[in-house]
Amino acid sequence: MQDVDWGAVAEEATSILQGLVRIDTTNPPGNETAAAFYLAEILRREGLSPEVIEPQPGRGSLICRLSGSGERGDPLLLLSHLDVVGVERDKWERDPFSGELAGGYIWGRGTLDCKGLTVMEVMVLLLLWRQGRKLGRDLILAATADEETGGKWGAGWLVANRPDLIDAPYVINEGGGYGFVLGSHRYYACQVGEKGRCRFRVTTKGKGGHASRPTSDNPIFLMGRVLQSLNEMKMSARMTQTIREFFRITAAGQPPEVVTVLDKLARGCRLNAEETSLLPEGLAADIYATTHDTLSPTILKAGEKINVIPSEATLMVDARLVPGSEPAAFLDRVREQLSPLGGVEVEVIDSGSGLEADPDSELYRCMAEVIAEEEQGAALVPFLSTGGTDAKHLCKRNGVRVYGFMPTRPDPDAPVRELLHSHNERISVENLLFGTRLLYNVVRRFCS
Ligand SMILES: [Zn+2]
């Protein structure tokens, strides 16, 4: 078996990612078909048999399967998505669709979310194929359309209409793999679950009238009280299996002051600035958000004219729920909270329960082993994502375990998690190669 020439892999992965970023797949409208054909052509040139599935004009997803003997077990699915979120061009230092290589980074929308992962997964498939390696299980690559607006034409469509194409109990997906340093140790966070969502509309009503003759039931004043009441709503800490495991692993072998801070976090306490400074950037906020139901008012509407009191005001609220906290029960709590105000209507717009995959699986253990070997003793820790991914579609099938694992080393100059959906999104060539190498080692071990 030939050793992999990682220098050549870095060059090839960079070039494929640059080409992929240059295909603008901003969703809406998406236009992922062009990106799917671009990758299909690369795979076809090598003798593989990719398929582009297009349930709606322009909304193509790429699927490619390497067949294995089945001796090692059920298939592994490498999942990612081809669409990206929009950009505010004037806020970027470089053209977001240029794929420009500068200062060791490939710049552009999607380099981290999630075309970078797509390219890592394509490279893993290509490397195993070129080696002529006999696999002990099927390996499936799926780069789908439409993740950013819910997955209706991508993973959602495939699960509902062509489950045979992506049928696998093990899935590696976006949403995790971030390296971080805590106290004296290094960790990689593997996303094993996601928070649920409960989006609702609050409506207040009144008679309305001329602004010069104020009414006693101005719906805007009532909405002000609604906002205050929602802001004061008490959310208690909920420890899920994932977060308990996160604390168990990260507290081991740490100095006492770090253990104390982790313990406070585990009990749902807020930290002061000094305590927060002992943790990596953003971790305290992440822990808070993954152990509490949260709600954010996002859209507020009332009135058309300055001299007319409107008869209605509406507020949209985006709530995110810890796995185990169900949308219907959460909405009951919201109604109860607002009921003393009187005359307030609450309706659900969109909801879905959170997910949690078991971190005790063959694939999870394999990822943990590879991380420990490749990163000199670094530990894999399970984590929950505060946002949603295509995992929600895959998990509709029983027993499917989806792990968010796009391995990246900490990069203080371009912190991965802060650049997702943000201006100046970019990935270092070093991290593109690192992620490819880690995933290659995981997949090779898991499948052969
Ligand atoms: Zn994404």
Image (cartoon, rainbow, N blue to C red):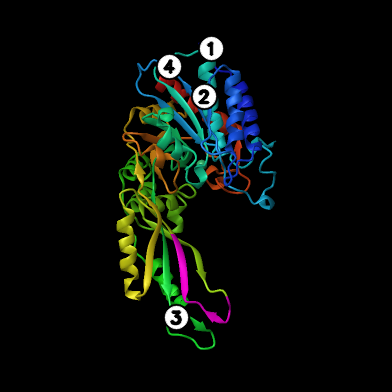
- Number of residues whose C-alpha sits closer than 10 Å to that of mark 1, classed few (under 14), some (14–19) or many (20 or more): few
Q: CA distance from mark 1 to mark 3?
A: 79 Å
User: The C terminus appears in which quarter of the rendering?
Assistant: top left
What's drawn in magenta, residue-wise?
Answer: 305-317
- Amino acid type at circle 3 is Lys
The first of marks 1 and 3 along the sequence is 1
* Mark toward the viewer: 1 or 3: 3
- Report the front residue among 146 and 403: 146
* Marks 2 & 3, CB-CB < 8 Å contact: no
SS at circle 1: loop
Q: Position of residue 324 (x, y in %)?
A: 30, 49
Answer yes or no: disc 3 within 8 Å of ligand 1. Answer: no
Residue matched to label 1 = 2
Q: CA distance from mark 2 to mark 1?
A: 15 Å
| Secondary structure mostly taken by the magenta-highlighted segment of the chain | strand
Q: On residue 207, which mark appears?
A: 3
Q: Residue at x 41, y 74 (%)?
A: 225
- Amino acid type at circle 4 is Leu
- Report the front residue among 429 and 446: 446
* Mark toward the viewer: 2 or 1: 2
- Number of residues whose C-alpha sits closer than 10 Å to that of mark 2, classed few (under 14), some (14–19) or many (20 or more): many
SS at circle 3: loop
